[in-house]
């Protein structure tokens, strides 16, 4: 399905069908009776919530076919939000039972309750810990690698023991054909986990890279130049990104997503540009040439190659310019003559990463217009200053906007304000594409 709208609709409909199908099939004759509406409603919430949690494994496995219509950043945001919905449904299941009939509270006596109830208790506790550590990871000061490892373990416990509880109760699943659907969902969930934790890392070991150079940029930004070892390298679309693992096996947990900043059509080397803002990224400047590296990619729908457009408006702040550099370098090598307008915001003139590269590209691409927006400009600054707001964009985006596409990348607040300003200026939502920094 090449049309992203058709593909996107297909996956949404399929997700809803899979989520609700266990409930629909369980209600097909013969249906057990005699328990009352609220007990049955409680069971329904539990089944739907469990189905949602099982599908989470597929959402986070980075299947390109699923992510392509939306962008993987949108898929991962959806994963975060839908986990909270599933959590609410699953938690409502025992609460309704306890309120409706106090005798169910006896099942909380862990040492005397039947195993199916123990499974439910451990599953629920695991889910609570999973949600709490995900929502408040930074406040809890959890190391990313520790959080990611615990996140996977808690997810497996929550889903695996939740499924064991459903089969232990055996109220709706006594018939084999009704149990079959849950078995298939379990295969989908844990098959996705095996793929992303075992099969994909093995594939990455077959295509290793070596660090050729670490190039410092302004603004505490560094470009990591990689060369393929023993293979032809990967081709990516300008604007895409990859997960990077450095100096260790790809089976290890430590991997981080970074945008490509090099020519997408060139396979003999790739470049990833990284801002030093955290424990891992602060070490990039010290990486030595020859260091082993692995890439999981390319990923992402943030690329003009997916659209027919008459012109491009690129809007970025800080290191959000990285995918824009890849787009500009690739289009320059292709000899693209479409008009391109880059609006690039920074705190100071000395913070402008790729400043010289942009000057060079401005000469190579005669259709490129670069507008720097400096928050605290020097005294003799002749250009735009302050923030990227509606008035500034009105001065620099095309008056005739038919056929233009707008690509935005940067910090969350910057993206929100720039997107709102474009909407206020009459730019249609379908023409705006955004890439968010926070994928983890």
Image (spheres, grey):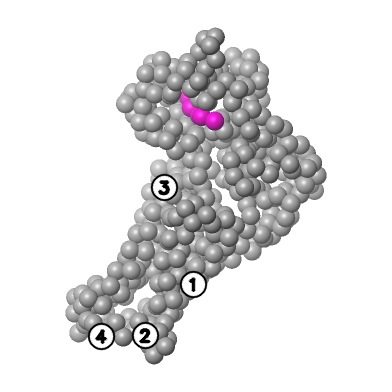
Instruction: Give me the C-alpha separation between circle 3 and circle 4.
Output: 46 Å
**Which one is in front in this view, the residue at disc 1 or the one at disc 3?**
1
Which of the marked residues, 4 or 1, is nearer the chain's N terminus?
Answer: 4
**Which one is in front in this view, the residue at disc 2 or the one at disc 1?**
2
Number of the label disc, if any, that sits on residue 109: 2
Q: Which residue is mark 4?
A: 103
Instruction: Give me the C-alpha separation between circle 2 and circle 4.
Output: 11 Å
Which of the marked residues, 3 or 4, is nearer the chain's N terminus?
Answer: 3
Residue occupying image coordinates x 50% and y 68%:
154
Which of the marked residues, 1 or 3, is nearer the chain's N terminus?
Answer: 3
* Residue with the most extreme bottom position: 112
Q: Residues within 10 Å of mark 3 (few under 14, many from 20)?
A: some
Q: Which residue is mark 3?
A: 8
Q: Under tag 1, what secondary structure?
A: helix
Q: Under tag 2, what secondary structure?
A: loop
Residue 40: quadrant of the picture? bottom left
């Amino acid at each position: 399905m090449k049309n992203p709208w058709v593909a996107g609709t297909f996956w949404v409909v399929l997700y809803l069908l899979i989520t609700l199908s266990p409930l629909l099939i369980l209600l097909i004759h013969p249906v057990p009776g005699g328990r009352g509406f609220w007990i049955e409603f409680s069971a329904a919430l539990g089944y739907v919530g469990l189905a949602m949690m099982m599908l989470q494994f597929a959402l986070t496995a980075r299947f390109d076919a699923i992510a392509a219509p939306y962008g993987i950043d949108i898929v991962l945001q959806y994963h975060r939000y839908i986990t909270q919905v599933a959590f609410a449904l699953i938690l409502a299941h025992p609460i309704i039972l306890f309120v409706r009939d106090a005798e169910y509270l006896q099942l909380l006596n862990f040492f005397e309750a039947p195993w199916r109830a123990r499974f439910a208790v451990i599953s629920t506790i695991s889910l609570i810990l999973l949600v709490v550590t995900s929502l408040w990871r930074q406040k809890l000061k959890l190391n990313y690698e520790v959080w990611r490892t615990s996140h996977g373990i808690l997810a497996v416990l929550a889903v695996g023991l939740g499924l064991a509880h459903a089969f232990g109760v055996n109220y709706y699943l006594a018939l084999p054909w009704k149990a079959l659907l849950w078995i298939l969902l379990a295969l989908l969930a844990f098959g996705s986990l095996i793929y992303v934790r075992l099969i994909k890392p093995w594939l990455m070991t077959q295509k290793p890279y070596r660090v050729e150079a670490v190039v410092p940029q302004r603004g505490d930004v560094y470009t990591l130049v990689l060369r393929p070892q023993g293979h032809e390298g990967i081709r990516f679309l300008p604007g895409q990104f990859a997960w990077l693992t450095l100096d260790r096996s790809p089976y290890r947990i430590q991997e981080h997503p970074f945008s490509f900043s090099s020519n997408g059509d060139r396979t003999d080397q790739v470049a990833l540009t990284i801002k030093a803002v955290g424990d891992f990224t602060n070490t990039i400047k010290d990486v030595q040439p020859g260091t082993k590296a692995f890439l999981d990619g390319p990923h992402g729908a943030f690329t003009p190659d997916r659209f027919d457009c008459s012109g491009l408006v690129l809007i970025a702040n800080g290191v959000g310019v990285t995918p824009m550099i890849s787009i500009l370098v690739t289009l320059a090598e292709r000899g693209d003559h479409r008009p391109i307008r880059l609006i690039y915001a920074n705190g100071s003139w000395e913070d402008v990463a790729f400043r010289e590269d942009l000057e060079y590209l401005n000469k190579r691409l005669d259709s490129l217009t670069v507008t720097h927006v400096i928050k605290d400009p020097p005294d003799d600054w002749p250009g735009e200053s302050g923030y990227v707001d509606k008035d500034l964009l009105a001065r620099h985006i095309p008056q005739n906007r038919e056929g233009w596409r707008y690509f935005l990348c940067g910090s969350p607040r910057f993206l929100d304000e720039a997107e709102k300003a474009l909407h206020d200026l009459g730019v249609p939502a379908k023409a705006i594409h955004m890439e968010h920094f926070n994928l983890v």
